[in-house]
Amino acid sequence: MPEAPLLEVDGLVKHFRLGGGLFAGAGATVHAVDGISFTLRQGETLGLVGESGCGKSTAGKTVLRLLAPTAGAIRVDGADIAALGRAAMRPYRQRMQVIFQDPYASLNPRMTAGTIVGEPLENYGIARGAAKRERVARLFDRVGLRAEQMAKYPHEFSGGQRQRLGIARALALDPRLIVADECVSALDVSVQAQILNLMIDLQEETGVAFLFIAHDLAVVEHISHRVAVMYLGKIVELADKRALFHRPLHPYTEALLQAVPEPDPQVKRTRVVLKGDVPSPLDPPSGCRFHTRCPIAEARCREIEPMIREVAPGQMVACHLR
């Protein structure tokens, strides 16, 4: 019998109502996330990719209940947390942690590194005093930092070291799920590789699951087991990493992969260049949201929204023509 998912997201919606202003009338709605569904198992990494503004970071924050969902279910170990209040959410927050994009802004500059990493332990009454310091020292060692660096402040660390601090803080409560929101995008390429390899090692060691949000497909390919592709608030393709990178089905996924630079100058390939800009989430197109830029769109694509369906084992796509 297959293992039950750690996380089940079913029809998740997050809309933002605007209060009016120069560019948007009162009552306008931003359709940031518009009905996405996926699962995540223990020890698995699901990459969530797409252009800037597609809703992937909003999806991650809503899964963590940092934002309240407009509709849909968020099940953790089978329990729906979508409508839980602050007190009822507390034990679930211990199981779900986050690594933020900016490794400096996410750290309190007035607190030492040891205090930052140890704060969750005190908040949950897990360890204090000498026991906390010992536990924090072990966390520092686990992420490649030295115990003597616990007395330093965030500005005394490099960008990669600060992100290691963020990872140590996320690991402090032994979570089962970590949402990594563009966690290496602000780092140099060589440092990115170090952080990614650290996350892979930690996953093998602890069995933690990652929802890995990124726009860099090379990074996603390196760390993910499965990949979900988002466009304008919708998941348009979800597949095993190997299937998606070697046999993409959705025209948007194909365009994303063709936009990745080819390192071999001798390799010639045909590239589909998408025309136009991404439509506004204030007024998403009818039918398939990608039809305004799709090179193979038909009349029905403009009128009927395609439902995401399984077209090959483990590979799902939202397209009338695939």
Image: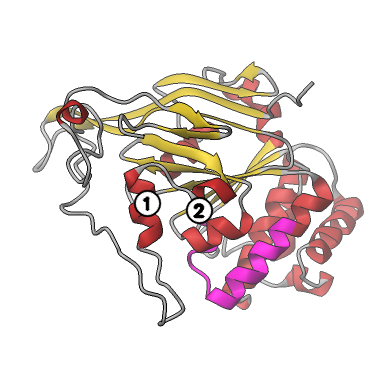
> Which residue extends farthest bottom?
265
Q: Is residue 314 left or right of residue 268?
A: right
In what element is the residue under mark 1?
Answer: helix
Q: Which residues are magenta?
A: 182-200
**10 within the magenta span:** no
- The residue type indicated by label 2 comes to Phe
> Is disc 2 surrounded by few (<14), some (14 to 19) or many (20+) residues within 10 Å?
some
Residue occupied by mark 1: 254
Residue positioned 67% across, 18% down in the render: 78
Q: Position of residue 163 (x, y in %)?
A: 61, 64
Q: Is residue 246 above or below residue 28?
A: below
- The residue type indicated by label 1 comes to Glu
Residue occupied by mark 2: 245
Q: Is residue 254 left or right of residue 145?
A: left
Most common secondary structure along the magenta stretch? helix
Of 256 and 54, nearer the camera is: 256
Q: Is residue 84 left or right of residue 164?
A: left
Residue positioned 41% across, 76% down in the render: 267
